[in-house]
Image (tube, rainbow, N blue to C red):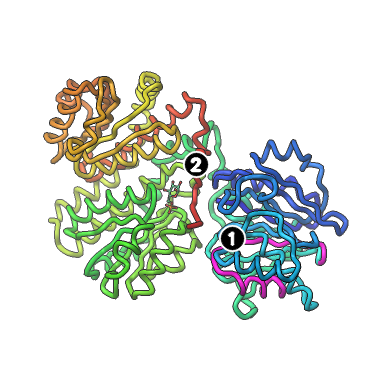
Amino acid sequence: MCGIFGCVLRNGPVVPQILDGLGRLEYRGYDSTGVAVIDNGVLQIRKDAGKIKDVVIRLKINEMKGSIGMGHTRWATHGAPNMINAHPHTDSSGRIAVIHNGVIENFMELKQELLDKGHNFISKTDTEVIPNLIEEEMKSDIGLTEATLRALRRLKGSYAIVVLSSLEPDKIVCARMESPLVLGVSDEGTYCASDAPAIRPYTNKVIYLRNGELATLDVNGYKIVKVSDGSSIERVPEQITWSLEMSEKQDFPHYMLKEIFEQPTSLRNGLRLQEKYVDLLTMFLDRGKEVFLVSAGTSQHSCIVGSYIFSKIARLTTYPVISSEFIEQYGSTVGIDSIVLAVSQSGETYDTLKAVDHARMRAATVLGLTNTVGSTLTRVSRAYVIQQAGPEIGVAATKTFTGQVLVLAQLALKLAKLRGKLSQDELDEYKESMQKIPGWVETVLEKTYDNVKDLALKYKDDKLFFFLGRGISSATAMEGRLKLLEITYVPSLAYPAGESKHGPISIIQKDTACVFVCPQGETHAEIIGSIMEMKARGASIISICEKGDEAIKRLSDSFIEMPKGIPELLTPIPYIVPLQLLAYELAILKGLDPDQPRNLAKSVTVP
Ligand code: G6P
């Protein structure tokens, strides 16, 4: 999604901070880069399609002066990625510039209205209506803030915007509706950005803007008002507790690898959830007539894992539903007795929030599981829990997947206790196993990385991969496959192994790579049968199995051994780790950047 950074400094130049901020937002995914500054009262804009570093050199952006400005990385929604459509966009007079993340649904009507009034449009974007609407409002002799408020009241859709104008050269106006925007304050100046890590080098004092709020920033601070009626809102800054180092690469070549290796720590943090929130969520889960687990991407795989754990240990039936399908599938039945547990790392995924809105409208109870404090999901949920994984920058989710599963497992365990579904001994055993998870993951990272590297070399030229598992491991297989797809672009399929004979087996040929997730447990005997089916057709078998599992090893061409004694229901956490590493290593061998996969964004905040 687009990245936004704005800042007004006591002493310029502002461009180095803008470029640094945009760099920290690169993970959101983008195709174009643009910067605007006000220098000696004159608005200057440089923008083009391309990566930050290339556009900066090509357009000599480093030479731009001024102590107030903004920058944008665009992820195209309306109009091709090119110079004209890159942000900032201006009004017809060229004095008001806007950067925007989101989608303006009624821009066609607004554009026609503005064209009729004599405004010129040069881009194909929806954004360009915003500076023109502001220009139109400013004709009634009102200031930039008031004109922006009036313009925003005309918009339907989602936005985080920053406005800069040579008409009022000392201030920045910014606002949000659905797309995230966070403010920062320091002695040197005032900032706004799509995400807190962009601001973190300059301050640890941040203010999360909420939907329907506008802020005016100058060197002395910020003033927040409601877009709907212009009334003032008092909000004191919050302290960011994570350090900049926590969101930087440290000694790792990529964020993704750093985040994979951070898992023992993030999982330890995930075991320190605030009890009262876990209890609250458990109480709601217990009360629901039906429980939907709503999410997208990797978060959906956590939900599928969660559905097995809820069913097996708490005897709770849950329905994992892809958020973009939720309204179509269950929109007319969800109601006052339903619980919707929305799972979203960012807490900002458009489809998930839309599903949640719908559920709330129909009086369902919405619960949230997210990694992002202050995110929209936390505000629209009746109760929520923060998974405590720390910022995740790599587009492919890794530590947040394992963290989500760990939280869901803790919820299931609490619920099992509340419902009396497990004996005290069983409860104690699960609890003890959960405490061991970070250590198991540590062992996996230590003991398997070299084997995974060999595996990647062996299979680097394969054109197709299958990922198969039974029971809860079918979800591990799906997540392993998603990692591979996201960052290596190698076509791949994932299926519950039992289903593979109903179609997918037809494309197995000699040496097709089949990755089997096969922990010990209830599904072990069945997965052996599935491996034999594939082997009989010439497939090359790669197994993730327990240490010393000779039956599986004998059938496999390659295998990765996992620690002994992990209860099957908790295996998705350690067993996904070698698959995360495999995807990473294959991406590196192919010369791809795993942190910035093509066409993908960390957080999809548009429909
Ligand atoms: C995007 C990301 C995925 C993520 C999904 C859901 O597609 O690239 O990594 O799993 O969004 O994001 P959420 O923040 O809702 O978990």
Residue 140 horizontal/vertical position (percent): 78, 78
156 falls in the magenta region = yes
The answer to whether residue 598 is above or below residue 507 is below
Residue 301, position as x, y percentages in the image: 32, 48
Where residue 181 sits: x, y (%)? 59, 60
Report if the beta carbon of the residue with label 2 is closer than 8 angstroms to ligand 1.
Answer: no
Q: Residue at x 60, y 60 (%)?
A: 182
- Of 135 and 283, nearer the camera is 135
Give the mark nearest the N terminus, 2 or 1. Answer: 1
Picture quadrant of residue 549: top left
- At a point 22% along the width and 21% down the height, the residue shown is 538
Q: Amino acid at mark 1?
A: Leu
Residue situated furthest front in the rendering: 116
Q: Amino acid at mark 2?
A: Gly
Secondary element at tag 1: loop
**Bounds of the magenta segment:** 146-167
Q: In terms of image quadrants, where is residue 504?
A: top left
Q: Which residue is mark 1?
A: 181
